[in-house]
Amino acid sequence: MQSEKIVRIGEKIVSVDRVKRLLDRILSLRAEGLSQQEVARRLSIDRSFISRLEVIGEVRKGKRVAVIGFPVANRDELEKICRDRGLEFTLLMTNRERWSMADGKQAVDFFNEVLEIIARLRNYEVLVMVTSEKWYPLAEALLDCQIVYLNLGSTPVQQDCHVDPGQFRALLEQVVDDTAADKEEN
C-alpha cells in the first residue's frame, strides 16, 4: 500500500503526487496541440503558470543564440522576431537608449554593468550583432563564440538605423536552423 506523498510548507499541506499528476496532465494536453490558454481554461489554472513550466522544462535543440544591436530604429519589431524564434537573450537599443544606459552613472557602475552583459554573453555559442563596424572586433576579442554580424555602417553611427525585418528574420532563421543541424550531427 502506497500513500500520498505530502509536504508541509508553513501552515499548508501540499500533495506532491497531486502536483505531479497536474503537471503530467498539462504537458499531455499541450502535446496534443491545445494552446496554453485552452489548457489553462480546462484545468482552471493561470496560463502564465503553463508558460513558466514550459520554460523550466525546455530542452533547446541547437546552440544558444544571443542578439545585441544598437542603434536600432525598429527595436520593438526586431525584438518580436527574436521572441518568436525563442531567443533567450536580446539586447537591442535605440541611440537614445544606449546613451541613457551610461547617463547619470559613475564610471565604475557603468563598467560593472557592461562586464555583466559580457559575462552573460559568454554563456551563448552564437552572437548575432547588429552594430557599427567598430564593435565586431571587440566582441571577437572578448567572447569565445561564433559571431554573426549585420553591419550598420562606419563608426560612429549617431542615429538610429532601420534594419530590414525580412533580412533580420532570414538571418536568424539561418543561424538558429544551422545551429540546430550542427547539434543533431554531434
Image (tube, helix red, strand yellow):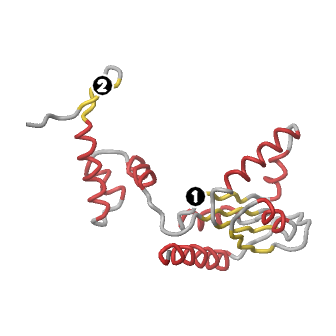
Callout 1 touching callout 2 (CB < 8 Å): no
Report the disc number at residue 6: none
Q: Is residue 49 left or right of residue 87?
A: left
> In the structure shown, which secondary structural element does the residue marked by tag 1 occupy?
loop
Give the residue type that dot 1 points to: Glu
Q: Position of residue 18 (x, y in %)?
A: 23, 40
Q: Quadrant for the N terminus, please.
A: top left
Pick whichever of labels 1 and 2 is earlier in the sequence.
2
Q: Position of residue 94 (x, y in %)?
A: 78, 59
> In the structure shown, which secondary structural element does the residue marked by tag 2 occupy?
strand
Q: Is residue 182 left or right of residue 140?
A: left
Would you place residue 45 above or below residue 126 in this image?
Answer: above
Residue 134 lies in quadrant: bottom right
Q: Is residue 186 left or right of residue 146?
A: left
Q: Is residue 141 left or right of residue 78?
A: right
Q: CA distance from mark 1 to mark 2?
A: 35 Å
Give the residue type that dot 2 points to: Arg
Residue at image coords 84%, 67%? 137
Residue at image coords 86%, 43%? 103
Residue 27 lies in quadrant: bottom left
Residue pointed to by mark 2: 8
Q: Residue lying furthest left in this view?
A: 1
Residue pointed to by mark 1: 88
Residue 111 lies in quadrant: top right
Which residue occupies the foreground of this view, 145 or 76? 145
